[in-house]
Image (cartoon, rainbow, N blue to C red):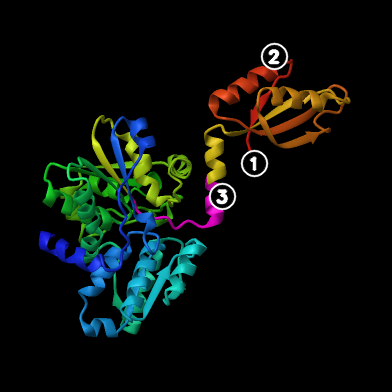
Amino acid sequence: MFQLEDFEKAEKVVSEVTLETKLVYSEFLSAQTKNQVYLKPENMQYTGAYKVRGATYKISTLSEEEKERGLITASAGNHAQGVAYAAKKNGIPAVIVMPNTTPLIKVNRTKSYGAEVVLYGDVYDDACRRAYELAEEKGYTFIHPFDDPEVATGQGTIAMEIFKELPLVEYILVPVGGGGLAAGVSALAKLLNPNIRVIGVEPEGAACLTASLKEGHVVTLDHVSTIADGTAVKTPGTSIFPYLQKNLDDVITVGDDELITAFLDMVENHKMIVENSGLLTVAGVKHLKLQDKRIALVLSGGNMDVITMSSVVQQGLIFRDRIFTVSVLLPDRPGELARVAGVVAKALGNVIRLEHNQFVSTNRNAAVELKITMESFGTAHKKEIMEKLEKEGYQPKLVQTNL
C-alpha cells in the first residue's frame, strides 16, 4: 500500500539529485483545448527524464549487502540512465540491459554515467528477461524499471511538486509504458485530493494497460509497434496493476501520427525537445472533452536522437501540409519550367525540389512530367496553390512526398 509518509520520505531523497522542473503554462494547448494546460517538463532533468527519481529512491532503500552485489536493470533508455546516474552517485557498479533498437543517444549517455551496457533483444521485454538471467548468474541486485512499489513511489514525487505549484489542479495526465509512473503519480494524487482525476496515456501500438484493464487482469501483448520506444512494453507491472486499476480514472490511446504532430507543437510553440513517449500527454489532452479545467501534463523525457528527430520533423511537416509534392504534365519546350515556377512563386509557394521526367510518355512534345516538392503555410495555402495551378491550365496531382 502506498503511504503518504513514504512519498514524503522519497521527496527528500529525490530532491537531492533532481532539478526543479517548474510547471510551464501552455498558451498554445490552453487555447486549443479551452482549458488551463500546464506542462511538467521532466525532459529537463539531469538525465533527460523522470526515471532518476524512482531509481534514486529505490537505491536509498537497499541494504549494504544488496548494494555491494552491484545493480542490474533492463530499460529502453530512460530508466537505464536513471539507474546509471544514481548508481554512480552512490559509488555502486551497474549493468544495464537495453534492446538492440534503443536510440544511440540513450546507449551512449548510459555508458557516460559509468554503467556497463548489454544490448539484447528487440523490445524491452526481451532485455528484461536477459537482465533477470544475468542477475541470477552473477548475483546482481535487480531494480525493475516500473513493477516495483518503491520505484513507483519515487516517480510519484512528481505529483507532490505539481500540487505545490498548482494546488487546485483538477486533471493530471501521465504517459504509460509499464505503469510505474502512472501508479506512483495517481496514488499520491488521490491521497492529496481524492477528487482529482488522473488519466494515463499510452501508444496505440503498445496499449498493454488498456488491454489489461479491459480483461481485469494483466495481459501480455503479442507484439508492440510504436515510435514511442520508451513506452514500447508488452506487459504492465503485475505488482502495481491493482493500484492502476484503483487510482487511474481513464486510459487514452494515441497514434504515432499524433505524436509526430505533437513534437512540432512542442518545438515551435515551447522550444522544447520532448521524446515520443513524453509527448503522449500532449497528444492525449486533445482527446478530452473538457473546458475550463486546470490540467497538468507530465512530459516524461526528452532523450531523442538526431536522426529520429529529423524524421519526425519531416513527417510532421508533411502531415500538416507544410510540405507537399504535386505532379504536372507539360509540353517539352523552352520556358515551360519557368512558367510553372512563376505560378508557384506568385502563390508564395517555396520550391524545395524539382524532378523532371522526360520519359513519362513516348511523345515528349505531348507531355513531360514535372514533380514539384514545395513548402506552404498549411492546408489552406496548399489548396490555394493547387487552385492557381489549375487556373493556369495545369492538372496538378498530389503524389507521395519522399524527402
| Quarter of the picture holding the N terminus | bottom left
Camera-side residue: 95 or 18?
Answer: 18
Camera-side residue: 57 or 125?
Answer: 57
352 lies left or right of 119: right
What residue is shown at x 37% (from left), y 42% (from top)? 282
- Which tag is nearer the camera, tag 2 or tag 1? 2
What residue is shown at x 63% (from left), y 35% (from top)? 400
Q: Amino acid at mark 1?
A: Asn
Residue 179 location, quadrant: bottom left
Who comes first in sequence, dot 3 or dot 1? 3
Q: Where does label 3 land, which residue?
A: 310
Camera-side residue: 155 or 102?
Answer: 155
246 lies left or right of 263: left
Residue 377 location, quadrant: top right
Q: Amino acid at mark 2?
A: Lys
Magenta-drawn segment:
299-312
- Which tag is nearer the camera, tag 3 or tag 1? 3
Q: Where does label 2 land, which residue?
A: 391
- Tag on residue 402? 1
Q: Are the residues tagged 2 and 1 within 8 Å (C-beta)? A: no
Residue 288 is situated, as x and y percent measured from the top left of the image, at: 29, 34
* Alpha carbon distance from label 2 to label 1: 27 Å
Q: Is residue 200 above or below residue 76?
A: above
* Alpha carbon distance from label 2 to label 3: 35 Å
In the image, is residue 45 part of the stretch drawn in magenta? no
Which secondary structure lies at badge 2? helix
In the image, is residue 307 part of the stretch drawn in magenta? yes
